[in-house]
Amino acid sequence: MNQLAVEPGSLRQTLMGLVLAVVTVLTLTLGDGAIAATAPAASLTIHLGTADGELRFEPDQMQFVVGQRYKLVLDNPSSEKHYFTAKDFADGIWTQKVQAAGVEVKGAIHELELKPGAIAEWVFVPQRPGLYELHCAIAGHAAAGMVGQLEIVASGS
Ligand SMILES: [Cu+2]
């Protein structure tokens, strides 16, 4: 009754074949964003306001490359709350997640409010090249200079 016995060599080949098949299926199933999601993220930081109360983003200009994965760290070193408002930019990226104070939000985000001392991490992959405006939505802050520019450039440019 040895009908089910398999030679060790051929069993190993069968398993290797299975592994290859699974890897192939996974690769074909995952979209661009999902593949990029496993790549290491370049970490960048933007401060919302300054410790001495200046109404500006620091830095107020940033460039991103299509298809690369970024972790954008936003913090608020000032004593008042600020907004990171960049709606067109948010439409031009694929957001993997936004993480803040133990909470992870998945999916599209257009605007973040940061209270004094708050930190948030926005992990995303730029999709659409363009020059996008950033501002703080608190009354008077953009007029006082709390604006910026976020640029997405095509890879290789
Ligand atoms: Cu502000």
Image: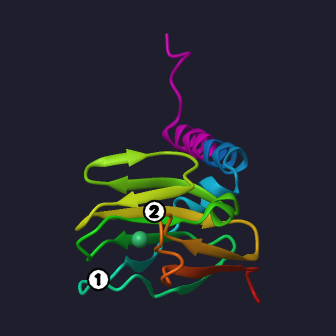
Q: Is mark 1 on a helix, strand or loop?
A: loop
Q: Name the residue under label 1.
A: 53
- Report ligand 1 position as a quadrant: bottom left
In the image: residue 81, left or right of residue 21: left
Asked whether mark 2 and ligand 1 are closer than 8 Å, the reply comes as no
Is residue 16 within the magenta segment? yes
Provide the residue designation for mark 2. Answer: 122
Residue 119 in the image, given as x and y percentages of width and height: 30, 65
Task: Tell me the kind of residue under disc 2.
Answer: Trp
Which range of residues does the magenta coloring cover? 1-19
Percent coordinates x, y for residue 72 in the rendering: 45, 71
Q: Quadrant of residue 61?
A: bottom right
Residue found at x 52% / y 43%: 12
Q: Write the residue at 53% across / 54% down.
A: 96
Q: Position of residue 25 (x, y in %)?
A: 68, 43
Q: How many discs appear? A: 2
**With respect to residue 111, does 50 lie above or below?**
below
* Res 131 seen here: yes
Above or below: residue 119 compared with residue 65: above
Graded by Cα atoms within 10 Å as few (under 14), some (14 to 19) or many (20 or more), the crowding at tag 2 reads many
Label ID, residue 75: none
Q: Which secondary structure class fits the magenta region best? A: helix
Q: Which mark's residue is nearer the viewer, 2 or 1?
A: 1
The spot of residue 29 in percent (x, y) is 70, 44
Kindly indicate the quadrant of the structure image that contains residue 113: bottom left
Is 40 contained in the magenta span?
no
Distance from Cα at disc 2 to Cα at disc 1: 24 Å
The residue nearer to you, when weighing 105 against 2, is 105
Q: Is residue 40 visible?
A: no
